[in-house]
């Protein structure tokens, strides 16, 4: 065992969250793609199985069962998620998918009026967010080329908050931003951006898909108006898991822009009235009947976050990504790699973006060696060490394998992103 490997082993021995690693199925190898899809835990598997058993044994009575009744499951999972985002239990609901929830909050909170007709975003946002913003503008007869402001990046990797602040002009009706940029992993200053937007009378919300479950937030204390996120990345809810939606309680009573019967007050939902009586909580912004089998795994997964505490999860995440950056500096110097993620802890989310001209090929070679990364064109290898199941030894081993792949030219036999072996 080398000195560096011994150091990784010592770090694992001192890790307070190491016990959670045994709670996951780790057959995928060295898994560093938890910011795309988290691994399955035994607890999530159990609660999913319990939902299937309830369906098998109770049929429709599963909706009113004593244990986790399906009728209230979106609110129950929302309440379990609330501590991760710094919200009250009734300000969060687990519902729909991320993009569906983006459409809901835009339909509800985007109210162009007079000169205020524009939406502010960035050019580095996840494509689905921009597509939803564009769609909502067109539905209102507004030209996205004129009414969607996309703050430009100075370096192609990150967004300078000063540029966002400068773009909060008096013609902006709504600001919608990511908490963490999906490609580079930059963590934006949500508190400051919210404060400035409100000083200028602009509602502001966030796509927190790349931060919920790995970085703590204080949405309610900061006054964030609304937020959305998915349940299948760091929350480990499984492919297509129910997404999350946060609405600050000061907006309770605002009618949902997209109405549906599961947004009803629970005590009135089965009145079967054609006029919606919205719930007096974030539950009002649900639309249709929830997908129970996409909610159930989150019950088990979120138990672990409650036990671990999001503060300790964040501490280990920063330690893991900092350790990864240090190893890249030491092991991969001179091999064409650049780190596209901010090195400052307060600006770093949960993953590290390695840039390399042969990133696509390197990702293929890594997978062949049992390391699961994520490729983002044209040149980014995203490595996301998830605090609940990634060890320091995993990180050390992954970088060692990277060093051998590139140092020995093993990646050159794989096609590039265009399918060509050059």
Image: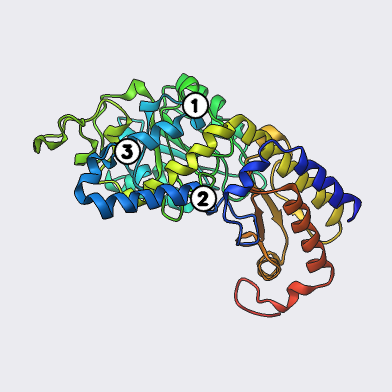
Residue nearer the viewer, 315 or 329: 315
Q: CA distance from mark 3 to mark 2?
A: 19 Å
Q: Which mark is residue 86?
A: 1
Residue nearer the viewer, 120 or 255: 255
Quadrant showing the N terminus: bottom right
Q: Which mark is residue 67?
A: 3
Q: Earlier in the sequence, mark 3 or mark 1?
A: 3
Q: CA distance from mark 1 to mark 2?
A: 27 Å
Q: Which mark is residue 42?
A: 2
* Above or below, comparing residue 102 to residue 114 in the picture: below
Residue 112 visible within the image = no
Residue nearer the viewer, 309 or 338: 309
- Residue 270 drawn at (x, y percent): 13, 37
Q: Earlier in the sequence, mark 3 or mark 2?
A: 2
Q: Which mark is residue 356?
A: none
The number of numbered badges drawn on the structure is: 3
Q: Residues within 10 Å of mark 2 (few under 14, many from 20)?
A: some
């Amino acid at each position: 065992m080398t000195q560096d490997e011994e150091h990784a082993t010592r770090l694992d021995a001192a890790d307070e969250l190491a016990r959670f690693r045994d709670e996951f199925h780790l057959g995928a190898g060295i898994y560093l793609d938890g910011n795309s899809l988290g691994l399955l835990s035994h607890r999530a598997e159990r609660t999913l199985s319990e939902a299937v058993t309830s369906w098998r044994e109770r049929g429709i009575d599963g909706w009113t069962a004593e244990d986790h009744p399906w009728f209230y499951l979106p609110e129950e999972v929302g309440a379990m998620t609330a501590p991760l985002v710094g919200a009250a239990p009734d300000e969060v609901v687990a519902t729909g998918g991320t993009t569906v929830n983006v459409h809901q909050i835009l339909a509800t909170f985007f109210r162009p009026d007079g000169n205020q007709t524009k939406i502010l975003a960035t050019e580095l946002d996840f494509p689905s967010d921009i597509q939803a913003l564009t769609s909502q503008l067109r539905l209102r007869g507004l030209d996205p080329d004129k009414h969607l402001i996309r703050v430009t990046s100075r370096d192609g990797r990150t967004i300078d908050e000063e540029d966002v602040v400068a773009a909060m002009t008096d013609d902006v009706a709504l600001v919608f931003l990511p908490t963490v940029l999906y490609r580079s992993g930059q963590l934006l200053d949500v508190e400051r951006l919210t404060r400035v937007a409100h000083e200028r009378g602009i509602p502001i919300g966030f796509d927190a898909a790349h931060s919920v479950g790995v970085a703590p937030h204080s949405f309610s204390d900061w006054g964030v108006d609304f937020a959305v996120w998915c349940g299948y990345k760091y929350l480990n809810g499984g492919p297509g898991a129910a997404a999350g939606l946060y609405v600050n309680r000061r907006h309770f009573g605002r009618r949902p822009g997209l109405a549906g019967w599961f947004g009803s007050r629970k005590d009135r939902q089965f009145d079967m009235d054609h006029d919606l009586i919205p719930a007096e909580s974030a539950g009002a912004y649900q639309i249709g009947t929830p997908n129970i089998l996409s909610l159930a795994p989150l019950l088990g997964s979120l138990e672990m976050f409650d036990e671990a505490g999001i503060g300790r999860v964040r501490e280990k995440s920063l330690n893991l990504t900092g350790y990864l950056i240090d190893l890249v500096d030491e092991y991969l110097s001179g091999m064409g790699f650049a780190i596209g993620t901010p090195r400052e802890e307060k600006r770093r989310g949960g993953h590290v973006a390695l840039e390399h001209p042969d990133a696509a090929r390197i990702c293929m070679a890594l997978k062949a060696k049992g390391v699961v990364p994520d490729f983002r064109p044209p040149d980014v290898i995203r490595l996301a060490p998830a605090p609940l199941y990634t060890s320091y030894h995993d990180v050390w081993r992954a970088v060692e394998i990277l060093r051998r792949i590139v140092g020995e030219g093993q990646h050159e036999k794989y096609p590039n992103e265009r399918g060509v072996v050059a």
